[in-house]
Image (cartoon, coloured by chain):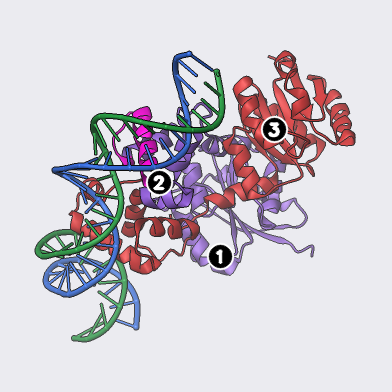
Chain colours: A purple, B red, C blue, D green
Amino acid sequence: MGKELRIVLIEDDDVLRMGYQSLLSDVPDFIVINTYGSYDLAKKQLPADQPDVILLDIQMPGTNGIQALPVIKKALPHTNIIILTVFDSPELVFEALTMGAGGYLTKNSSAAKIIDAIREVSSGGGAMSTNVARIVMHSFQKNLNSPLTKRETEILEKIANGQTKSQIATELFIDPETVRSHVKNIYVKLDVNSKSEAIKTAKERKFI
Amino acid sequence: MGKELRIVLIEDDDVLRMGYQSLLSDVPDFIVINTYGSYDLAKKQLPADQPDVILLDIQMPGTNGIQALPVIKKALPHTNIIILTVFDSPELVFEALTMGAGGYLTKNSSAAKIIDAIREVSSGGGAMSTNVARIVMHSFQKNLNSPLTKRETEILEKIANGQTKSQIATELFIDPETVRSHVKNIYVKLDVNSKSEAIKTAKERKFI
DNA sequence: ATAATATCCCCCAAATTGGGGGATAGCTTT
DNA sequence: AAAGCTATCCCCCAATTTGGGGGATATTAT
């Protein structure tokens, strides 16, 4: 199934847009269907373009890339969208990923990386540049020097999932009073005195 | 600063271990300090080896890679660990990342990818093979067809953070009774009748 | 052996929860 | 214009949960 990949570029910088266009047009099985200087200019044409992959900038006149992302995803559910931007703040990265981006590349990415990424997302995969991967991986990392014991961490995680102490007690086959003891110790260790503060502090310090 | 990178391999398959060793030894600025068939065999030597990067298999006799990861991280906080394994289940990937892995490569990775990854994690970055990236990105993706309104989602997120209805009301500058109304609607839409069920269901279906 | 951990117990007042029953205003869709 | 959805506010009530006190005991680690 060596079908061509239909590609659309949405990028407001004329020079970059033309550069990417010529770059991608040189790839034998890539077809750059259309390029646009903004999402607002693109939106009426997109359904007709039927792109397999959209390379989407974030900073654009009018609707920005992050705002456009969920709208495009709803209109064209089978189109994979790769964010291609100079920005790599954690907030933007997470927002893009939650909104359904299939890839997130920063503009220092080499031609080969961009081409790889297009192929990758087209086959259902994910693609990120290394600085984005760093951000994403860092967000998973737990603090390995938590003051909480294994049991305390376990219980605090269940609390963070909205379970009450009695529910937790049932699940762990222990007495509700035992759960209470653990919770008291958690509060002392985290220097808080309520559920929500405990969750907030523990998340901030990556104990859970 | 073109300093050499000190590398240790922990991999139980003799053929693969030797293969990686010769592969990495050929890179000018890489020094393969030592290789081991298991973590249990490696643990006494590791402090003396002072590796910058450890390539760590998961499946091994004795202590497995996932179990070894936090132990190594605590003993050698400045060493970056790359998981190199045939397994790529979401559970293993998330566990490895939370335990402090700086990279996660599956064994179909090319030599160039492995070498890149070693350099990347050494400079504080992150590295994943594309199938791992897919898993990670998928975990961020929210369901764009949530039945919950923006306000309801906002409130459910705060509930999931352990906040009470009155705290939420204060934060949103609305009456606690309004929060209660929203919560009731959320329960109806999700077909649940408690906080914990709502959080569980919403997370499963990726509404929050 | 001293400390930490995990387990269990009692008392009590205040807050929270979930289930009922409503209402109103604004906005969109038909 | 009517119907529907959304966001906002209001009342009642019983049951549960919470957080702050005070403890105890057995196992595990250091």
Quarter the N terminus of chain A occupies: bottom right
Tell me the number on the disc at residue A175.
Answer: 2
> Which residue does the image show at 51% across and 26% down from the upper left?
A145
Tell me the number on the disc at residue A51.
Answer: none
Question: Do residues under tags 1 and 2 come within 8 Å of each other at their CB atoms?
Answer: no
Question: Circle 2 sits in a helix, a strand or a loop, which is it?
Answer: loop
Query: Disc 1 or 2, which lies upstream in sequence?
Result: 1
> Which residue does the image show at 34% across and 69% down from the upper left?
B188
Residue B207 picture location, percent across and down: 44, 58
Question: Circle 3 sits in a helix, a strand or a loop, which is it?
Answer: strand
Mark 3: few, some, or many residues within 10 Å (few <14, many ≥20)? many
Query: Depth check: B165 or B62 in front?
Result: B62
The reply to whether the magenta stretch includes residue A28 is no
Tell me the number on the disc at residue A77.
Answer: 1
Tell me the number on the disc at residue B82.
Answer: 3
Residue A176 picture location, percent across and down: 37, 46
**Magenta residue span:** A176-196
Residue B197 picture location, percent across and down: 40, 59
Q: Amino acid at mark 1?
A: Pro
Disc 3 vs disc 2: which is toward the camera? Answer: 2
Query: Depth check: A100 or C3 in front?
Result: C3
Chain bearing mark 1: A
Chain bearing mark 3: B
> Which residue does the image show at 41% across and 35% down from the upper left?
A202
Q: Amino acid at mark 2?
A: Asp
Measured in 3D between alpha carbons, the distance from the residue under mark 3 to the one under mark 1, in whole angstroms, is 35 Å
Chain bearing mark 2: A
Disc 1 vs disc 2: which is toward the camera? Answer: 2
Disc 3 vs disc 1: which is toward the camera? Answer: 3
Measured in 3D between alpha carbons, the distance from the residue under mark 1 to the one under mark 2, in whole angstroms, is 49 Å
Q: Is residue B127 visible?
A: yes
